[in-house]
Image (cartoon, rainbow, N blue to C red):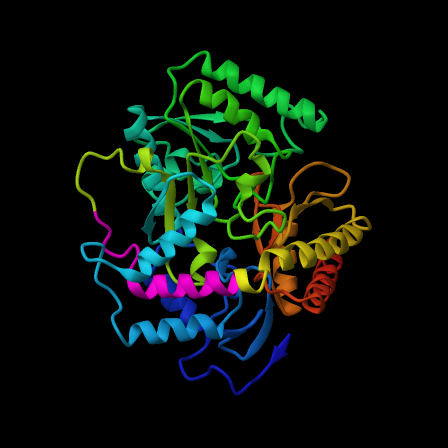
Amino acid sequence: MTTDASQGQAHGSAKHLYQRHQSVLPDWLAVYYADPIELTHGEGRHVWDAEGNKYLDFFGGILTTMTAHALPEVTKAVSEQAGRIIHSSTLYLNRPMVDLAERIAKLSGIPDARVFFTTSGTEANDTALLLATAYRRSNQILAMRNSYHGRSFTAVGITGNKGWSPTSLSPLQTLYVHGGVRTRGPYADLDDAGFIAACVADLEDLLGHVRPPAALIAEPIQGVGGFTAPPDGLYAAFREVLQERGILWIADEVQTGWGRTGDNFWGWQAHGQNGPPDMLTFAKGIGNGMSIGGVVARAEVMNCLDSNSISTFGGTQITMAAGLANLTYLLEHDLQGNARRVGGLLIERLRAIAAQLPGVREVRGRGLMIGIELVKPGTDQADPDAAAAVLEAAREGGLLIGKGGGHNTSVLRIAPPLSLTVAEAEEGAAILERALRSTQF
């Protein structure tokens, strides 16, 4: 960890800021680290805290700083747009919103696509659920076990991860399906083909007992759940069952979109044998830190609402300018390809490290979306204390990572900006190795 003692003392210590934080913000607002840090600026794949410490960022503000910190192209676009007009709402024509919508509609793979912009992934999923239930005239939703779809009342109501679901009250009736976690659960010992067949049989059995639901919502790779994923093709097999009954498929691409998985631009494309989803939701990385979310849907589904609606802040000019500049940079610099190449090297390096550590159950992921699941050595029991200790040790070593996992928050989450270099991947892996070895392993 690099320190510049001249940085960041003007506004008082992080400890004092945390005391102020605790006195005015909710108790349930999670903060990382025993001694929380204030990040003040960043550049490329690095950030600095208020004490002047420099960190290699392997979490990107929860997969949100997708291209790079302080990316000049995005900074310039935001500054220039702010000098013209920042906001007008959707009640007026908005050229940057139309420009970005056209590009996303084409990239989505959904035929005759319509795009609605929101301010977050939570709001995007909320909108998708509204559309699905209105279109299908049903309040039943299929969701995956171990899933997470946001913080709103509706999104929390379908979340299949009890650590992030503070209430069972919901306007929706949710039915949970097997398949989002490959290496745990009743079908974990089957091969991939057997796993898919068992999950499809479970889905068919479930649908035989209920009225046809509105939709299945699923993350191609579960984010908060610990970067777990089914075998490729599971959701294609589900799609066949759903289409027979008119049930919609919503792909939650809030964390998997924009090429992060390397192999595909969207996570659903690993399951696209029976066509694209009816809807996909996006957010996080497209704004590179600016607040953008949205829904892409077939026109028939998007246009099903029979009452007026607007968005005050969704699609506002300044965020659309950021999104356009960020998407252009992503495509022109083939950051999807970089995620595939550098992510592939990083995951193999981490697997080599894990092979020597009995407390690492699994290193999994795709592209620059990698999870390291920790257990108590010699058992299959989740070890959240070890995950917390490694998180702290990595920070001390100059690396920021995340954590998650539906099985007691025992997964380290690694998701750097997609412009990560090979040298930075090696540096991060070395810090992580030291952090893992310095704990109880």
Q: Disc count in the image? A: 0
Percent x, y for residue 45?
58, 69
Q: Is residue 193 above or below residue 396?
A: above
Residue at left offset 44%, top offset 39% = 110
Residue at left offset 47%, top offset 37% = 162
Task: Report the residue that reaches farthest toward the top.
Answer: 208
Is 421 included in the stretch rendered in magenta?
no
In depth, the one of 1 and 83 nearer the eye is 83
Is 313 included in the stretch rendered in magenta?
yes
Locate residue 220: give its quadrant.
top right
Locate residue 132: give its quadrant.
top left
Task: Report the residue that reaches farthest toward the bottom.
Answer: 6
Q: Main secondary structure of the magenta part?
A: helix
| Residue 321 in view in this figure | yes
Percent x, y for residue 389?
64, 56
Locate residue 126: give its quadrant.
top left
| Residue 33 in view in this figure | no
Q: Is residue 261 left or right of residue 194?
A: left
Q: Is residue 434 above or below residue 227?
A: below
In depth, the one of 62 and 384 nearer the eye is 62
User: Which region of the structure is painted magenta?
Assistant: 310-330
Placement of the N terminus among the 4 image quadrants: bottom right
Residue at left offset 60%, top offset 80% = 3
Task: Report the residue that reaches farthest toward the right.
Answer: 356
Residue at left offset 37%, top offset 44% = 295
Percent x, y for residue 204?
51, 16
In depth, the one of 81 and 416 nearer the eye is 81
